[in-house]
Image (spheres, rainbow, N blue to C red):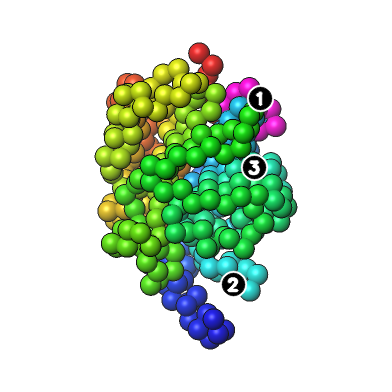
Amino acid sequence: MQRRNFLKTATTALAGLSGLLGTTLSASRLRADDASSSIPVFRPSFEKWRDDALSMAWIGQSTVLINFFGLKILTDPILFDRVGIYLLGTTIGQTRLSPPALRFDEIPKPDIVLLSHAHMDHLDYLSLKKLTNKFPNQIACVIAANTKDVVDDLPWKSLAELDWNQETTIGSGDKALKLKALQVRHFGWRLPGEKDRSKGFFKTGRSYNAYMMERGGKRVVFGGDTAMTDSFKEFGKTLQAGNEGGAQSQSNIVDIAIMPIGAYNPWISVHCTPEEAVQMAHDMNARYFMPVHTNTFTQGREPIGEPIARTKAAIAASKTMNLAVDTIGKSFVLPSA
Ligand SMILES: [Zn+2]
Ligand SMILES: [Zn+2]
């Protein structure tokens, strides 16, 4: 692409991103200054996590570091100050309201990076470039259908698209993880003009996934980015029917549901409310709820703190579910009993 055209595309994309996130860049900077002191961020003591347990911490936005019985998984890594267009060695776009719970140089080597979709606040090219350059040919990456091209120049150990309801096993023996892609209700274009599955391009458009991870008889669902959908109810039914019960499965529940809770106002057609997120977790028989996708960027018009407060209230009302954490950076360890 000629440089002029590229810059034009980048500028248009930036305008699109800004519109998508429901803010202007200058406004986000003002909000960032105001907000950084009011959003608590802890540093997870992941060095103490045991390799015979299931532990995780919310790093910010939808980035979650998971130690799944010794296998390290990182979801939608957003590890620097900005997200947006990666151009001439820097990222042009929105700044964070809160720092990541771990600095880039503190992030342990992930065995697997899971990417839900190609939106800028989930797929950050700079984070993935730095991770793969630090750990070349050591990280397996799984990504939604028709999004692989965004990151296929990076030195992954493996890079695979997984489409809705497809399953795969990553690694073997002690390091194996069963993975299934689940459908969500969202959209997929990264740059304006790209084909998008939600716009009718089912076979060729950019897609968007949630994932079910299973290992050692435990299940974690990473909900990706989604509006309210029956997909998780359908998945819950397949669990109840025992169709998902592998040799190691001991029950038909989801142990931890990692669900997005922010950016619903006014983007309700693509982002669920906290109550809907809790309902979807309930629909798949989740025991613990880990909230993400809030307190990191200015995306919706809802006040900072509202998504977490509404999530807590919805979980208290559910009576069947427990909140894993309510704060960026706090460690959660799944109780063994
Ligand atoms: Zn998205
Ligand atoms: Zn998002």
76 relative to 298 in the view: left or right: right
Kindly identify the amino acid type of the residue bearing the numbered disc 3. Answer: Pro
In the rendered image, is residue 302 in sight?
no
Q: Is mark 1 within 8 Å of ligand 2?
A: no
**Element type where label 3 sits in the image:** loop
**Frontmost residue, 336 versus 263:** 336
- Residue where numbered disc 3 is placed: 110
Q: Where is residue 89 in the image (x, y as percent from the top left)?
A: 65, 70
Q: Where is residue 45 in the image (x, y as percent from the top left)?
A: 66, 32
Mark 2 and mark 3 residues within 8 Å of each other at the beta carbon: no
- Residue where numbered disc 2 is placed: 87
Q: In this view, does 117 lie above or below 10?
A: above
Determine the CA span between mark 1 and mark 3: 15 Å
Dot 2 or dot 3, earlier in sequence: 2
Q: Is residue 236 above or below residue 295?
A: above
**Element type where label 2 sits in the image:** strand
Mark 2 and mark 1 residues within 8 Å of each other at the beta carbon: no
Q: Residue 50 carries which label?
A: 1
Kindly identify the amino acid type of the residue bearing the numbered disc 1. Answer: Arg
250 relative to 282 in the view: left or right: right
64 relative to 235 in the view: left or right: right
Q: Is residue 210 above or below residue 234?
A: below
Q: What stretch is highlighted in magenta?
A: 46-54
